[in-house]
Image: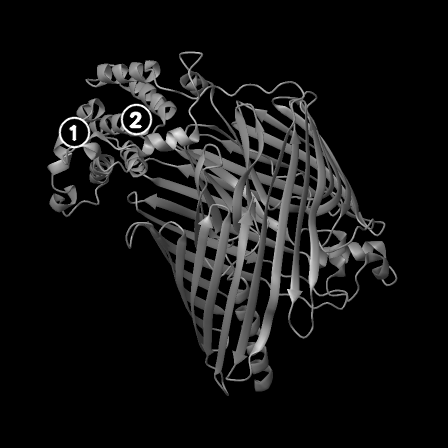
C-alpha cells in the first residue's frame, strides 16, 4: 500500500513538473502585423502560439486594451513583452502580459487618435482590430495649400532629432515661444524635485495627480515627450479643476512638441468644450488657431487608388527552437521528457485592389524528436484561400481554418461565406468537416454546417451574433446547437457574453460573461462567470474511457440511445467565477487582486468507466507591477497566491523581472516558490523554480531567445522523502517579414 502511494505521488509530481517545465516557454504572443489597408483604415493582426479568446476591450486616451482568455493554465503567471515597430501605422507600442490561467492583457499605444473596432474572431490564434482615422482627424491633417509637400518618415525623424536652440548655441536653454507659454516652465528648471518636500501623506490621490503634473514638467524640459504625455494624461484624470486644466494644456503642448498635431487639436477642442470661460481659454484658442493655420509641411490625404490598381503584399513569421527537459527522482538517472527541434512558419500573401481582395495563408508546425522513440510530427494547422468582393460585400474563405465563434469548436476543413448586407448587418454560412487535430489528414467522418449573423446597433456600442450549427460523427448526430455572442463597448465599460445550447443533447454547453468597468483615479474592476459542460457535450464524448476511436466501433456494443447517455455521463459541469480589481497607484506602479472559484461536478460510473468525484477550488491572488522600479527600461512583477482545494493548501510567490539594455537586449530573471500542505494524507511539499531568459533583437524583425530553468520539489513521505529535480533550456530564433 505504501509503495502504491509512493508510486502515485512520484508519478503525479513528475506529471506536474513536466507540465510546468514544458509550459515555461516564451510568451504566447508572437507579434503584430498589418494584414489589410483600405483607404483611411488598417487592419492589425495580433498572433499567438495558443488559442485565445478576446473577451473585452477598453479604450484609453492614447490607445486601447484587449483582455484575452488563453487555452492553457500556465504556471508562469506573468509574462511581459514589449514590441516597438514603426511599420505598424498608428501603432507605436504593443505590451503583452498576464497568464493563461488569469487572463492576458494586450495593451496597444497609438501615435494618434483612431477609431477602434475589434473584429469577429475567425482564427482561434489571431486577434484582429480595424483602426480607422476619424473624420475630424482627416480635416486636421489635410494641407491648407494643395501644393504642400508630404512629410516623409525621414523628415519626421530629422525634425525630431534636430538640435534645439540651446543645443546649437548657448549652454543655458533659450526659451522658444512655446516654452514661454508653458505654465511654470521657467521655475521648473531650477526648482527642487517635488518629491523632496512631499508630505508623508503623499498617498492621497490629489497629491498623486499633482506629482504626475510636476514630473511631467520635468520630462518635458528634458524633451522626454512620451513620458511627459503619459504623466500629463494621468494628471488630467484629477478631480481638481485647476490641476486638470493645466494638465490638459500641457498634454496638448507635449503632443505638439512630439509632432502629434492631430492629437493636440483634439485635446485643445476638449479643453474649450469643458472650460470655454476659463482664464486659459483665450490662450488655448490662439494656440489652436496657430496649429491649424501654420505653414508647416503636412501629410497629404492618401490618394484613392485607381480602379483595378493592384497591390501585392506578403507577411509572415518563421521560428525554430531547440528544447530539452530532464527530470530526476531521488538522485536516479534523469529521464528526458522533451528533446526536440520545434519549427513554425506562418505566411500570408494578399493581392488587393479597389474591387477585389485575394489572400492565401499557410501555417505549419513540426517537431523533430531527437529522443530514442523518434516521435517526430508535422502539422498543417492552417491552409486557406480567401476572396473578398468589395462592391458586393461578399467574403469567401476555403480550406483548413479555425474559429472560436459562430458555434465552431475549433479547426475544420471547409468553406466560410459572409455577406455584408449593410454597415450594421452581416450574414454568413459555414460548411465542411471538423478536424480533431491539425496533424490529421482530410476526413469526411465529421461533417458540419451552420448559419450565422452579426448585427451592430448604436454606432457599434452593441453587437449581437446569433448562430445555428449542426455536426455529425460517423453517421450519428454529434452536436446541434443554437447560441449568440453579445458585445457591448463604451469608453469605460465593456462586456462580452456567449450562450451555447445543444438542442439535441438538451444541455447548456456554455453561458459565459465577462464585464469590465473603468473608474476615475486609475481604478478598474472585472467580473468573469463561466458555466459550461467540460468538455463541450458532443456524442463523441461517449468514447472517453472506452478504448476505441470511432462511434462506429462503439455501435457494435451499445445502442444509439445508450451512446448518447454515455456521452452525457462522461461530460462534467464546470462553473468558474472571478472577481478582481486593478489600481494605478502612480504612472509606474499598479496593484491588483482577484478571487476565483471553480466547481467541477462529479460524473457517474457507466460503461465500465469509473465515477469521478466533484471538486471545489478557491484561488486568492495579489499582484504588484512596476515599471522602472530598478531604473529606466525595467519592469518587475510580484504575485502572491493562495489556493484552497479539497485535499491541499498551496501558498505561492512568483517574481518576474525584465531589464532592457541598449534597446536590443532583454534579460528576464524569474523565481517561483510554492509550499503545499496535503491535508488528506498529512504531508507537505516545497518547490523552488528559478529561471533566466535572454532575448536579443538586433533588428525589428529578428529575435534570438535563450532560456534556462531549474525546478526542485521536495515532499515528505511515510517511508522515503521524495526529491525531484528538473532542468530545461531552449534556444532559438523568431523572424517576421
Residue 50 location, x and y as percent? 58, 52
Instruction: Locate the N terminus and report the quarter of the image it occupies.
Output: bottom right
Q: Residue furthest top?
A: 145
- Residue at point 16% right, 29% down? 174
Dot 1, how many residues are within 10 Å of its Cα: few (below 14), some (14-19), or many (20+)? some
- Residue at point 51% right, 21% down? 302
Q: Secondary structure beneath disc 2?
A: helix
- Residue at point 50% right, 73% down? 726
Q: Would you name the residue on which mark 1 appears?
A: 174
Q: Secondary structure beneath disc 1?
A: loop
The answer to which image quadrant residue 356 occupies is top right
The answer to which image quadrant residue 428 occupies is top right
Task: Please give left or right for residue 655 compared with residue 43 in the image.
Answer: left
Residue 262 location, x and y as percent? 38, 23
Task: Please give left or right for residue 532 compared with residue 729 in the image.
Answer: right
Above-or-below relation of 553 to 255? below
Task: Please give left or right for residue 439 compared with residue 573 in the image.
Answer: right
Colour scheme shown: one colour
Above-or-below relation of 255 to 314? above
Task: Please give left or right for residue 12 compared with residue 441 in the image.
Answer: left
Amino acid at each position: 500500500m505504501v509503495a502504491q502511494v509512493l508510486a502515485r505521488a512520484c508519478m503525479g509530481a513528475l506529471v506536474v513538473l513536466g507540465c510546468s517545465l514544458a509550459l515555461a516557454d516564451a510568451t504566447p504572443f508572437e507579434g503584430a502585423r498589418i494584414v489589410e489597408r483600405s483607404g483611411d483604415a488598417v487592419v492589425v493582426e495580433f498572433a499567438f502560439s495558443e488559442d485565445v479568446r478576446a473577451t473585452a476591450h477598453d479604450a484609453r486616451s492614447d490607445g486601447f486594451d484587449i483582455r484575452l482568455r488563453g487555452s492553457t493554465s500556465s504556471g508562469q503567471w506573468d509574462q511581459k513583452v514589449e514590441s516597438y515597430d514603426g511599420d505598424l501605422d498608428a501603432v507605436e507600442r504593443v505590451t503583452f502580459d498576464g497568464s493563461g490561467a488569469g487572463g492576458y492583457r494586450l495593451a496597444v499605444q497609438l501615435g494618434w487618435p483612431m477609431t477602434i473596432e475589434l473584429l469577429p474572431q475567425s482564427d482561434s490564434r489571431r486577434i484582429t482590430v480595424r483602426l480607422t482615422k476619424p473624420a475630424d482627424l482627416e480635416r486636421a491633417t489635410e494641407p491648407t495649400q494643395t501644393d504642400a509637400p508630404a512629410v516623409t518618415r525621414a523628415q519626421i525623424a530629422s525634425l525630431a532629432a534636430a538640435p534645439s536652440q540651446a543645443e546649437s548655441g548657448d549652454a543655458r536653454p533659450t526659451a522658444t515661444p512655446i516654452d514661454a507659454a508653458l505654465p511654470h516652465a521657467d521655475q521648473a528648471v531650477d526648482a527642487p524635485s517635488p518629491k523632496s518636500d512631499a508630505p508623508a501623506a503623499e498617498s492621497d490621490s490629489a497629491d498623486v495627480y499633482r506629482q504626475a503634473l510636476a514630473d511631467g514638467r520635468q520630462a518635458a524640459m528634458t524633451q522626454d515627450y512620451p513620458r511627459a504625455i503619459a504623466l500629463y494624461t494621468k494628471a488630467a484624470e484629477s478631480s481638481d479643476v485647476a490641476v486638470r486644466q493645466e494638465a490638459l494644456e500641457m498634454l496638448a503642448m507635449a503632443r505638439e512638441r512630439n509632432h502629434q498635431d492631430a492629437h493636440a487639436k483634439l485635446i485643445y477642442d476638449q479643453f474649450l468644450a469643458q472650460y470655454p470661460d476659463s482664464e486659459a481659454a483665450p490662450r488655448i484658442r490662439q494656440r489652436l488657431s496657430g496649429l491649424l493655420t501654420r505653414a508647416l509641411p503636412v501629410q497629404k490625404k492618401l490618394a484613392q487608388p485607381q480602379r483595378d490598381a493592384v497591390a501585392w503584399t506578403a507577411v509572415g513569421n518563421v521560428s525554430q527552437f531547440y528544447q530539452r527537459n530532464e527530470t530526476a527522482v531521488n538522485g536516479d538517472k534523469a529521464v528526458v521528457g522533451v528533446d526536440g527541434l520545434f519549427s513554425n512558419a506562418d505566411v500570408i500573401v494578399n493581392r488587393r485592389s479597389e474591387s477585389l481582395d485575394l489572400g492565401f495563408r499557410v501555417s505549419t508546425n513540426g517537431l523533430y524528436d531527437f529522443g530514442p522513440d523518434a516521435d517526430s510530427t508535422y502539422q498543417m494547422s492552417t491552409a486557406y484561400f480567401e476572396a473578398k468582393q468589395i462592391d458586393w460585400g461578399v467574403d469567401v474563405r476555403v480550406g483548413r481554418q479555425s474559429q472560436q465563434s459562430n458555434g465552431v469548436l475549433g479547426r475544420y476543413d471547409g468553406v466560410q461565406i459572409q455577406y455584408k448586407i449593410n454597415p450594421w448587418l452581416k450574414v454568413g454560412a459555414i460548411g465542411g468537416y471538423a478536424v480533431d487535430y491539425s496533424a490529421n489528414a482530410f476526413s469526411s467522418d465529421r461533417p458540419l454546417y451552420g448559419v450565422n449573423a452579426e448585427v451592430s446597433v448604436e454606432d457599434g456600442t452593441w453587437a449581437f451574433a446569433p448562430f445555428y450549427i449542426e455536426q455529425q460523427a460517423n453517421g450519428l448526430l454529434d452536436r446541434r446547437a443554437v447560441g449568440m455572442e453579445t458585445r457591448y463597448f463604451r469608453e469605460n465599460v465593456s462586456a462580452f457574453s456567449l450562450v451555447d445550447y445543444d438542442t439535441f443533447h438538451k444541455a447548456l454547453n456554455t453561458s459565459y460573461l465577462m464585464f469590465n468597468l473603468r473608474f476615475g483615479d486609475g481604478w478598474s474592476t472585472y467580473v468573469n462567470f463561466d458555466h459550461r459542460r467540460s468538455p463541450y457535450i458532443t456524442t463523441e464524448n461517449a468514447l472517453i474511457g472506452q478504448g476505441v476511436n470511432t462511434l462506429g466501433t462503439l455501435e457494435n456494443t451499445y445502442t444509439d440511445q445508450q451512446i448518447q447517455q454515455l456521452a452525457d455521463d462522461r461530460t462534467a459541469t464546470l462553473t468558474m467565477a472571478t472577481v478582481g480589481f486593478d489600481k494605478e497607484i502612480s504612472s509606474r506602479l499598479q496593484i491588483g487582486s482577484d478571487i476565483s472559484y471553480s466547481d467541477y461536478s462529479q460524473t457517474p460510473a457507466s460503461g465500465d468507466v469509473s465515477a469521478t468525484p466533484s471538486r471545489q477550488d478557491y484561488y486568492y491572488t495579489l499582484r504588484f507591477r512596476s515599471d522602472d522600479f530598478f531604473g529606466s527600461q525595467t519592469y518587475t512583477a510580484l504575485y502572491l497566491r493562495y489556493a484552497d482545494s479539497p485535499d491541499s493548501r498551496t501558498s505561492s510567490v512568483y517574481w518576474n523581472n525584465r531589464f532592457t539594455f541598449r534597446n536590443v537586449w532583454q534579460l528576464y530573471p524569474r523565481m517561483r516558490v510554492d509550499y503545499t500542505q496535503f491535508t488528506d494524507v498529512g504531508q507537505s511539499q516545497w518547490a523552488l523554480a528559478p529561471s533566466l531568459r535572454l532575448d536579443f533583437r538586433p533588428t525589428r524583425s529578428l529575435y534570438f531567445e535563450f532560456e534556462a530553468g531549474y525546478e526542485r520539489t521536495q515532499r515528505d513521505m511515510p517511508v522515503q522523502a521524495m526529491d525531484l529535480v528538473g532542468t530545461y533550456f531552449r534556444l532559438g530564433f523568431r523572424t517576421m517579414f
